[in-house]
Image (spheres, rainbow, N blue to C red):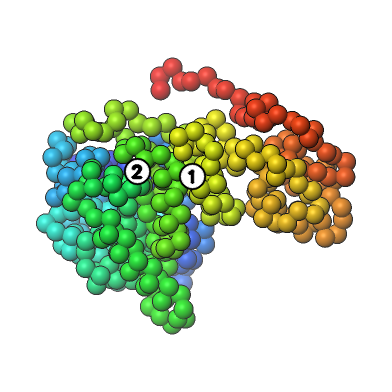
Amino acid sequence: MPSALQSKLEILADAAKYDASCASSGAPKRDSRNGKGIGSTTGAGICHSYTPDGRCVSLLKILLTNSCIFDCAYCINRRSSNVRRARFTVEEVVMLTLEFYKRNYIEGLFLSSGIIRDADYTMEQLVEVARQLRDVHGFRGYIHLKAIPEASQDLIAQAGRHADRLSINVELPTETGLKRYAPEKRTSTIRSTMAGLKLKIDAVKGERKAPRFSPSGQSTQMIVGADGANDAAILSTSATLYASYGLRRIYYSAFSPIPDSSKALPLAAPPLQREHRLYQADWLMRYYGFEASEIVQGSADGMLDLGIDPKLAWALRNRNRFPVDINRADRELLLRVPGLGARTVDWLIDARRHRTLRMDDIARLTGAVRRARPFIITPDHRPVADSDSALLRARLAPKPVQMSLFG
């Protein structure tokens, strides 16, 4: 690889590491074993790998450029940032994607960009990369494009015809935070573009012969810990986004302090455990029927408990709802039992149609029976009714681990 191209790759791959929304779950099956085209995806999407700081890098994950006309305070690529700049041409990104794919380094492309010249020009460049890969080279691997909210709807429609997934970052959880740290961006513009995407995606779902349009849907990313929004505000925004725009995923990215940043930004990053708890809470909203408000209800300062997962925290705050009879309780209530996942609950409901379940049966269905035991009743098990929540928390919380001396 020419040294100039290698240098660009180093700069623009590093600049892309702050974007967490690169998972490919939900990509449709597509392969080239019939001799047509190049590349493939499996039904479960591409494989993932992670850097030591937890970022997914399994795709060729790059920016088209890290130059930007915007000056968002939390962004290392803002126009006032003193970082090395680089820019790929469309042909360079296409060539890198194909060459890396042929060497089995990657299974797809995640492409984002700083805003250069204007939103439409930047979006045109992103679309042209995807178009050349699909139409010129028959690339059938996964493509995730970052959509520019300020770009024209026609360009975003073109992006959706080539990409498996589109994403638009909401940046910060609250409109107040966005106005303060990214005054050149507008919440209304971001939301209206998301709404336009939803309409197009829904329209295609209803027509069997309609041209493909972002078959893996749309996603977004929020920065956590930059603007002071608590977990309650973050989860409330997430609930609104899921309900209003049909998002497939919301990614939570812990704020990373950047060189020469605004004094209004925190000096230290929030604990990564906070990011992890938000993902767990997000999971509860999407698959377990929890409302955002009840996940954080009663918690201090609207923050999730970093010591235990949100489902256990909710169960300890609502001891009056437990224990539940494992042979009689409905699915909605069983989903709220710590230690019982959605798949386990479905197995359990199926199994109890044929026999009365006892504690040994539960132990065979879940590997987390120790966590479930204080919250369930079976014919051979009834937990101590007056078990104190604080004692129970101490018993079920993960054991403390030695902090890294070099972290």
Residue that appears at 40% across and 51% down: 237
Expressed as whole percent of the image width and height from the top left, the position of residue 275 reads: 44, 39
Residue occupied by mark 1: 279
Q: Residue at x 33, y 48 (%)?
A: 174
**x, y (%) of residue 41?**
46, 61
In the rendered image of this protein, does residue 32 appear above or below residue 273? below
Residue at horizontal 41%, vertical 76%?
203
User: Residue drawn 21% across and 68% down?
Assistant: 152
Callout 1: few (<14), some (14-19), or many (20+) C-alpha neighbours within 10 Å?
some
Q: Which residue is mark 2?
A: 223
Residue at disc 1, secondary structure: helix
Q: Horizontal and vertical percent for residue 151? A: 21, 64
Instruction: Name the quarter where the C terminus is drawn.
Output: top left
Circle nearer the N terminus (2, 1): 2
Contact flag, marks 2 and 1 (Cβ < 8 Å): no
Q: Quadrant of residue 218?
A: bottom left
Secondary structure under the numbered disc 2 in the rendered image = strand
> In the picture shown, does residue 56 fall above or below 159?
above
Mark 1 belongs to which amino acid? Tyr
- Whether residue 329 can be seen here: yes
| Res. 93 image quadrant | bottom left
Taking 136 as reference, is 247 left or right? right
Determine whether, in the image, residue 344 is placed left or right of residue 292.
right
* Residue 289, above or below 54: below
Q: How many marks?
A: 2
Is residue 49 visible to us here? no
